Amino acid sequence: MRRGRARRAAGGAGAGECGVRVDGQADSRDPALAGALGVDRPRLGLPGSASLWQGARVTHVLVVDVGSSSVRAAICDGSAQIVAETAEAYSFTVAADGTSEVDARRLQGMVERCVDRILTNAAPIEAVALATFVGNLLGVDGENQPVTPVYTYADTRPAPEAALLAAEGGIASLYQATGCPLHTAYHPARLRWYARARGAAPAIWLDFATYLYRAWFGREVPCSHSVASWSGLFDRASRSWSAEWLARLGLGPERLPALADFREAEVGLASAHGERWPALRDVPFFLAIGDGAAAHIGGGAISPRSTSLTVGTTAALRQLRMAEVPPGEVPEGLWAYRLDERRELVGGATSEGGNVHAWARAHLKLDAEPLAFREPFAHGLTVLPMFAGERSPGYRADATATLHGLRLSTTAFDIVQALFESVALRISQVHDALGGSDALHAGGGALHASPDWAQMFADAMQTPVYLMGEEATLRGAAMLLLEALGKGALDVFAPRVSRIFEPRAEVAEVVRAAKERQIELYRRLYS
């Protein structure tokens, strides 16, 4: 096997929480998985390098998840079950001016320590998958050395540049072409901001995952279509960088990485990392996928009418659809991100989620546990929870959190309840734009920390919520890797369902009225 990128044979900082645990095997199958969008349909062929390993016996794979609040590494078996896991927690550096960033070398060190620890397990590794938080941007020099922080999706400093780009016109067509609205979460505004605020641009712009692979392999490595599609610069039709955006930004394509399907793989670690991880030296590393895509798959929402709800630091609602040629229209207020050459995710995300829970815990000194016993919306408060600006559905980067309706009788518990309910109401607007769904496959660290929050989402959308087993992102990345290796369609890797929350019809009218109040408050402030 030649070293380098494998192709088809036919041619062609301070550590946070950490430790290793071993998981059990018990799963339950969700009937909504029947008729999944996967290999059970006519095969379109395996692009890139995955075909080289088809038929090979797979007993264990390594999965790395670089999330927005922790780094995790896990060993999964041939059925995508996690058998060992290790993690380190961290947080972005934030400031009142909208800064949200992280040091690339610090984050790289955390990833590598997690890999070190997980490899102390004796299981042989046959392949590696990487999931990453997306919408991040890192400048490097010609030697792949970072010259900027990793700017994250939550950085709102480019808001003025987003407004200026909007004023130039032509944004609606670019929205449909890229699947991404003009917003500070995406690269166009951030690149324009960097040119104004920082001056000379770095030699190359990368995402963190591509930087990481280039550091490990000591050569150029492409960015996956999945990760690129979260940038706002990815052309859905050509699966290349958007020529129109590059022209507007004065950015040559040579200053961005090449693009490839995530099933392309890199083999042959550079000497330093090959010596550090001899068990991985000649193992295929598949290109990174967006953590949202992995979480969606790992949650089991793979049939056409199933929808995934992920509440981590932020929140997102997604549906898996077959990629159309030419690309289908993106509903207003939503986005379309690529999973692979056959499939895309359509949905919306909010900048609020578990970060609202963290804020309440840190500043109000209260948690969510008592909320399950409180009457919905009895507090009389209306909240816009945009602590980090707005993404879906209105994409107002200048939006801030608003609490309306305070009285002398209002308690701290009222405020916490209103905050949690407000996130559910905002996500319900995304659900409406998607046209509804039959079920919500829910997961994410914030929901598992406060599972009764799931009842609020079920009530807000009047849709059953299946709270899935933990670590959906890790499992989803493993499922996609095993599917690429020909080990089965996605629906053979049964997800765990830990609890089911049915919508309460008796609160539907109360929820509807609260949602109307929230929409009206937003209209008065931002329309």
Image: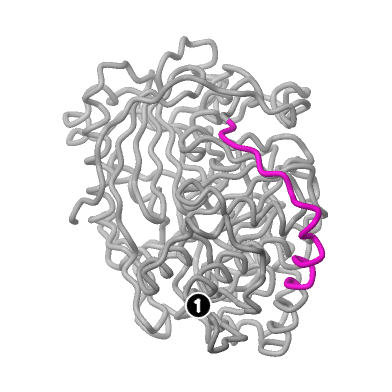
Image coords of residue 86 (percent x, y):
30, 36
Q: Nearer the viewer, residue 308 or 408?
A: 408
Residue 147 is situated, as x and y percent measured from the top left of the image, at 27, 66
Q: Nearer the viewer, residue 181 or 527?
A: 527
Identify which residue is drawn at 50% across, 77% down.
411
- Relative image position of residue 94 (x, y in whole percent): 35, 73
Q: On the image, which quarter does residue 28 sit in? A: top right
For image coordinates 60% across by 69% down, the residue present is 391
Quadrant of the image for the C terminus?
bottom right
Q: Residues within 10 Å of mark 1 (few under 14, many from 20)?
A: few
Residue 105 image-quadrant placement: bottom left
Identify whether 487 is placed above or below 232.
above
Is 498 one of the magenta-colored residues? Answer: yes
When the figure is inspected, residue 450 is found, relative to residue 374, above or below; the finding is above
Is residue 314 rendered to the left or right of residue 101?
A: right
Report helix, strand or loop for mark 1. Answer: loop
Task: Give the vertical position of 466 relative to 376 (above or below).
Answer: above
List the residue tagged with mark 1: 411
Percent from the top left, x then y, of residue 18? 25, 42
Residue visible at 45% across and 64% down in the picture: 355
Q: Which residues are magenta?
A: 497-515
- Dot 1 amino acid type: Thr
The foreground one among 40 and 23 is 23
- The quarter of the picture where residue 200 lies is bottom left
